[in-house]
């Protein structure tokens, strides 16, 4: 009877978590698809290569060796630990206990492989434990400057801490489960690390050890399900999105900034004053740059959801380093916040977007001052471990400010007037344009 109740409870928990997680991931997908179309399907072999090297191989992380090694411990440990989940799920749905072990216990080679695998997971878990404590120390005791910036106040710091504490919780559950099992069965399983923990159970009754083992089992399973549901609301979504984001990464040379077709036509007509070819887009529909998330591409929005908030971009940004308000990390966080706000509004209005009178510029998101501070140096793009481009968003927003709102510093206005009238930034007419040499 208890077994049936356990199976039912397990199935219900998985069903509820699966439903909530599906809703969360579908929301993220819908929000990303609010962006404009853009084609990133060229050169699939290079894209695959980038994904394997940068997302799977964590290549760009190794510019900073110690955090990179700690991150690899957590990443590899997290992936490997999930192998044990396979057995947990089969046991949960069938009411069995260590079903794989009992299926192979009379086949020495397979039994040995099983014990080796669980022991390997336990050793990896020890590395995860070490790395998690190191990350908590960097964040809360050493207060590494990159991880204590104003844009991280509030939810972002809590989010990072929740995940690190969740790691500790999951590790406690795994070791309680395995060590409890070992203590109950006279260490017959032979797991390496939990074998060292068995003496901790000496003097406890079998009932107490059984409860500890079951708490570890259920705790681990519930923790993993909760993590799945939580992930779409966290910066840790990057553990999944880093793969598509690197696959669809920009293959254009560093420093390449895409032209605006309408402007290209305009310039061509200025340089060759024949009648300009007719544009395909009605004049009133032509929009320069981006004012809101809808004007950015889906790749910009995928970038925003993939951002790990690591701050490597801001730590290399010359504007940020010289005390300007600009932080490329904040650009990505603000873009995601605006997208989340838009998504919530769409949900509240039965799937329809109703103008809220706001945009990504100002309104508590990205300020004009931040946008103007960018030197377009590309350092943020170079540093990002998951191939994000804050610069592309900055340029698009700044284009909109300048070209749609005429919102530029006074110092630039004279140059714009000259370009409009003379076809060059200097105050000479077209016939005298080479006079700039003498100016
Ligand atoms: S491109 Fe702009 S945001 Fe990026 S590092 Fe350079 S100045 Fe900073
Ligand atoms: S944009 Fe890249 S480098 Fe900057 S905080 Fe996000 S993940 Fe880190």
Image: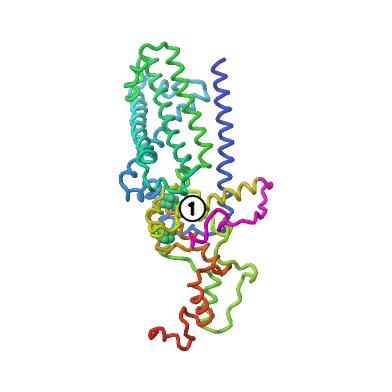
Answer left or right for 9 relative to 182: right
- Quarter of the figure that contains the N terminus: top right
**Any part of residue 275 in sight:** yes
Q: Is residue 83 above or below residue 361?
A: above
Q: Which segment did they paint magenta? A: 348-371
* Magenta: main secondary structure: loop
Q: Is residue 100 above or below residue 360?
A: above
- Quarter of the figure that contains the C terminus: bottom left
Quarter holding residue 377: bottom left
Q: Secondary structure at mark 1?
A: helix
Residue 416 pos. (x, y %): 51, 75
Residue 146 pos. (x, y %): 39, 48
Q: Is label 1 within 8 A of ligand 2 (CB to nearest ligand atom)? A: yes
* Residue 351 on the magenta segment: yes
| Residue drawn at x 48%, y 66% as measured from the top left | 258
* Residue 14 on the magenta segment: no
**Scheme by which the image is coloured:** rainbow
Dot 1 crowding, Cα within 10 Å, few <14, some 14–19, many 20+: many
Answer left or right for 188 relative to 263: left
Q: Residue furthest right?
A: 350
Residue 340 pos. (x, y %): 57, 48
> Total number of numbered labels?
1
Residue closest to the eye, 409 or 294: 409
**Any part of residue 50 in sight:** no
Q: Which residue bears the numbered disc 1?
A: 332
Q: Residue furthest bottom?
A: 431
| Residue drawn at x 56%, y 27% as measured from the top left | 11
Residue 308 pos. (x, y %): 44, 47
Residue closest to the eye, 409 or 237: 409
Answer left or right for 227 relative to 115: right
């Amino acid at each position: 009877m208890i077994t049936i109740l356990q199976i039912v409870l397990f199935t219900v928990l998985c069903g509820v978590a699966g439903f909530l997680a599906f809703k969360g991931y579908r929301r993220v997908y819908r929000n990303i698809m609010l962006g404009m179309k853009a084609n990133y399907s060229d050169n699939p072999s290079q894209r695959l290569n980038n994904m394997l090297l940068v997302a799977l191989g964590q290549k760009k992380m190794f510019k900073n060796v110690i955090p990179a090694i700690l991150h690899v411990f957590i990443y590899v440990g997290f992936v490997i630990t999930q192998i044990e989940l396979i057995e947990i799920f089969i046991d949960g749905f069938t009411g069995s206990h260590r079903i794989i072990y009992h299926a192979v216990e009379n086949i020495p080679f397979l039994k040995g492989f099983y014990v080796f695998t669980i022991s390997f997971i336990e050793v990896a878990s020890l590395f995860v434990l070490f790395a998690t404590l190191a990350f908590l120390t960097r964040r809360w005791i050493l207060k590494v400057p990159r991880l204590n910036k104003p844009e991280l106040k509030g939810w972002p710091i809590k989010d990072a801490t929740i995940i690190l504490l969740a790691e500790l919780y999951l590790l406690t559950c795994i070791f309680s489960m395995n060590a409890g099992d070992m203590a109950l069965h006279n260490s017959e399983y032979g797991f390496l690390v939990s074998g060292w923990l068995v003496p901790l159970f000496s003097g406890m009754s079998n009932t107490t050890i059984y409860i500890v083992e079951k708490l570890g089992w259920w705790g681990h399973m519930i923790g993993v399900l909760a993590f799945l549901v939580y992930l779409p609301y966290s910066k840790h979504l990057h553990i999944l999105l880093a793969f598509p984001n690197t696959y669809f990464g920009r293959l254009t040379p560093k420093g390449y900034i895409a032209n605006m077709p309408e402007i290209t036509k305009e310039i061509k007509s200025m340089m060759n004053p024949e009648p300009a070819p007719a544009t395909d887009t009605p004049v009133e529909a032509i929009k320069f740059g981006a004012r809101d998330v809808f004007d950015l591409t889906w790749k910009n929005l995928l970038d925003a959801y993939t951002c790990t908030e690591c701050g490597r971009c801001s730590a290399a940004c010359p504007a940020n380093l010289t005390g300007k308000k600009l932080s490329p990390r904040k650009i990505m966080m603000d873009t995601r916040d605006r997208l989340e706000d838009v998504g919530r509004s769409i949900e509240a209005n039965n799937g329809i977007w109703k103008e809220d009178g706001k945009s990504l510029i100002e309104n508590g998101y990205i300020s004009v001052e931040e946008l103007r501070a960018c030197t377009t140096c590309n350092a943020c793009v170079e540093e990002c471990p998951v191939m994000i481009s804050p610069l592309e968003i900055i340029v698009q927003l700044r284009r909109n400010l300048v070209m749609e709102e005429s919102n530029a510093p006074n110092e630039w206005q004279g140059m714009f007037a000259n370009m409009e009238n003379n076809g060059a930034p200097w105050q000479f007419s077209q016939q005298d344009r080479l006079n700039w040499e003498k100016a």
